[in-house]
Amino acid sequence: MSLQLKAGRMAAFSDGVIAVIITVMVLELRVPAQDLPDFEGLRKVLPVFVIYALSFVEVGIYWVNHHYMVDDVEHVSHGLLWANLGFLFAISLIPFGTAWVGQRGVTPFSLSFYSICCASPAVAWMVLSALVRRRTRLPFAGSPVKQAISSILYIAVIPVAYHSLISALGILAAVAILWLFPPKRSIECRVRKGRPFSP
């Protein structure tokens, strides 16, 4: 028996999980103790806020690109559902990495751990996008080269963090900037299908 599973339910479930992930991250932001002067307190929480902002952008980029990817799928398979769950599990590690930095501070180990939490969904994304491509017979929504570069940069943060924390943060920011623009093929497909697109 062949079951035609609608992609809409997978997309709605994914949207809900990603919304919870973003909510959990913002709950980790803590106002500094009242005995600190305002600017001193702000200086103390600034590194944590930078990591939170990076995490928010990372999760947001995944959500946007997931939208483009699922838009190509009409029906999902059992394997695709599990691959999507694997991706959601991996992306749910980002708040854990963010909280680790928030509680332990910006140290070489905490940034290394954070980068591993960010690399996990990148790998899961490659698996998910390969299954979507097999099902739709369309080219990858996002560049496989860009996906590979992102994973390599995340791993590169580990040795770099032990030499320069600023450089490690710069690499993390570079990955976010790399993915800020929507995938070119998704724009072309939407135009071909007569769907509006606004950047």
Image (cartoon, grey):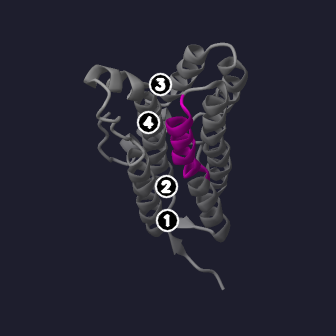
Query: Could you tell which of marks 3 and 2 lies nearer the N-terminus?
Result: 2
Which of discs 3 and 2 lies nearer the camera? The answer is 3
Query: Could you tell which of marks 2 and 1 lies nearer the N-terminus?
Result: 1
In the displayed structure image, the side of residue 197 where residue 131 appears, left or right: right
Q: Which residues are magenta?
A: 90-105
Query: Could you tell which of marks 4 and 1 lies nearer the N-terminus?
Result: 1
The local secondary structure at tag 2 comes to: helix
The local secondary structure at tag 3 comes to: helix
Residue at 33% x, 47% y is: 194
The label on residue 70 is 2
The residue to which callout 3 is attached is: 177
Query: Could you tell which of marks 4 and 3 lies nearer the N-terminus?
Result: 4
Residue 122 sits in quarter = top right
* Contact flag, marks 2 and 1 (Cβ < 8 Å): yes
Which of discs 4 and 3 lies nearer the camera? The answer is 4
Q: Is residue 12 above or below residue 46?
A: below
The residue to which callout 4 is attached is: 52
State the CA–CA distance, disc 4 to disc 2. Answer: 27 Å
Judging depth in this view, the residue of 71 and 155 nearest the camera is: 155
* Contact flag, marks 3 and 1 (Cβ < 8 Å): no
Residue 120 sits in quarter = top right
Q: Is residue 31 magenta?
A: no
The label on residue 10 is 1
Check disc 1 and give the amino acid type.
Met
